[in-house]
Image (spheres, rainbow, N blue to C red):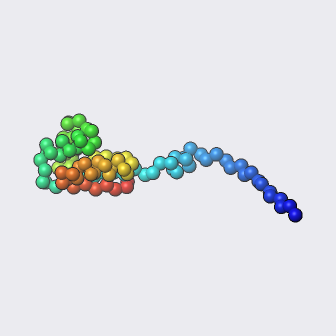
């Protein structure tokens, strides 16, 4: 008794660029720095320079935005990178949230 196995090859159309992009790229995450009135501008600027490698003037701009509006998005990127930035900022007691955008 012999068994026959039927093998069928299926030809599938190549996925479109949009399909590949949607599957390959996760939605970005954001690190948000909140105003806490408990740190000096200098402390915030120094920590921003450590966390996101910004220039001192860029750090001052972000610090003023946080002071004037209550918060600022300081990083947009993959979850792991946003969490890393958040941990550096939070290490001196700054108030930070990391959310999916």
Q: Quadrant of residue 59?
A: top left
Residue 71 visible in the shown view: no
Q: How many marks?
A: 0
Quadrant (top left/top right/bottom left/bottom right) for the C terminus: bottom left
Q: Which residue is rendered at x = 18% and y = 42% of the image?
A: 46
The quadrant where residue 70 appears = bottom left
Residue 98: percent from the left, percent from the top?
A: 31, 55
Q: Position of residue 48 (x, y in %)?
A: 23, 43
Q: Relative to residue 6, is residue 45 depicted above or below? A: above
Q: Judge by depth and name the residue closer to the eye, 22 or 4.
A: 4
- Residue 36 visible in the shown view: yes
Residue at the location (31% across, 46% down)?
Answer: 75
Residue found at x 36% / y 50%: 80
Query: Looking at the rendering, in which quadrant would you find the N terminus?
Result: bottom right
- The image position of residue 86, as x and y in percent, is 28, 51
State the residue lying farthest toward the front. 1
Viewer-closest of 60 and 26: 26
Seen in the image, is 20 located left or right of residue 2? left
Residue 68 picture location, percent across and down: 18, 50
Q: Residue at x 25, y 38 (%)?
A: 54
Q: Nearer the viewer, residue 85 or 63?
A: 85
Residue placed furthest toward the right: 1
């Amino acid at each position: 008794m012999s068994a026959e196995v039927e093998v069928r090859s299926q030809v599938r159309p190549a996925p479109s660029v949009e399909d590949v992009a949607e599957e390959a790229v996760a939605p970005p995450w954001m690190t948000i720095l909140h105003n806490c009135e408990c740190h000096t501008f200098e402390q915030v600027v120094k920590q921003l320079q450590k966390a996101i490698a910004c220039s001192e003037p860029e750090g001052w701009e972000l610090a003023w935005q946080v002071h004037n509006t209550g918060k600022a998005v300081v990083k947009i990127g993959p979850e792991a990178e946003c969490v890393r930035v958040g941990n550096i900022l939070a290490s001196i007691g700054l108030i930070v949230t990391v959310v999916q955008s």
